[in-house]
Amino acid sequence: MNKEEQKLVQGLAAGEENAYEVLFREHFPFLKDMAEHLTGDEFVAKTIVGDFFFHIWEIREDLRIGTSLRGYLARGVYNRCMNYLSSISAKGKVALDESLCGDNEDPLGRMLTKELEEEMNSAVESLPPETYRVFSMHRQEGKKYKEIATETGISVNTVKYHIKRALAMLRKTFGEYSGSLPNGGSGVSDNKKR
């Protein structure tokens, strides 16, 4: 953290409402946009970020930030978005979005995007061979479950199993990740029509 950020955090710890307002005003738009890219829902994004800021105020006296302030806030919102997505994934909704901060000119956003893109590609490539094949056909080639089943000679249920398995493995890998999602073609969105 730079000195200005340290002063802001110290103000928060002292219960200064002005420090909280500055934090909110400066970081809410970026965090809301990030959360909206992840969840695909503006209302959900605003709710997640609003709740996170409320949480920051509640724990203000115990805040310990070892990175940049924006990095800390982005990690917190990212983790909350992942928790939300995990909670709805059982209903077949979005698991992870392909793009985050793709047009962001912020150096931190670009750095986080690049880091996660590399990790995402590595994680996808490390999937078991058959799961990787099915997942790639669905995500990268945009094929529907039935098409994949026909081409591979497996049942639609087996295709679903491999997609679900891939998403579970990727969620496990990225559940604790403190960055943002890539804008590359290996994203992990589960909202394509089947």
Image (spheres, rainbow, N blue to C red):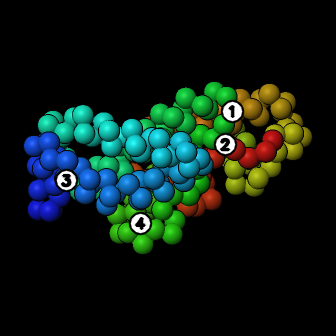
- Asked if marks 4 and 1 touch (Cβ < 8 Å), the reply is no
Mark 4 is surrounded, within 10 Å at the Cα level, by few (under 14), some (14 to 19) or many (20 or more) other residues, namely some
Name the secondary structure under disc 2.
Answer: loop
Kindly identify the residue that appears in the image at 44 percent across and 62 percent down.
114
Of mark 4 and mark 1, the one earlier in the sequence is 1
What is the C-alpha distance between the residues marked 1 and 3?
42 Å
Residue 148 placed where, x, y %?
A: 82, 43
Residue at the front extreme, as displayed: 17
Q: Which residue is mark 4?
A: 110
Of mark 2 and mark 4, the one earlier in the sequence is 4
Q: Which mark is residue 92?
A: 1
Q: Which residue is mark 2?
A: 190
Q: Is residue 57 left or right of residue 145?
A: left
Viewer-proximal residue, 46 or 3? 46
Q: Amino acid at mark 4?
A: Arg
- Asked if marks 3 and 2 touch (Cβ < 8 Å), the reply is no
Of mark 1 and mark 3, the one earlier in the sequence is 3
Name the secondary structure under disc 1.
Answer: loop
- Quadrant occupied by the N terminus: bottom left
What is the C-alpha distance between the residues marked 2 and 4?
24 Å
Q: Nearer the viewer, mark 3 or mark 2?
A: 3
Q: Is residue 161 left or right of residue 3?
A: right
Kindly identify the residue that appears in the image at 59 percent across and 47 percent down.
41
Residue 104 placed where, x, y %?
A: 45, 68
Q: Is residue 60 left or right of residue 28?
A: left
Q: Nearer the viewer, mark 3 or mark 4?
A: 3
Residue 120 placed where, x, y %?
A: 51, 50
Q: Is residue 151 above or below residue 55?
A: below
Q: Which residue is mark 3?
A: 18
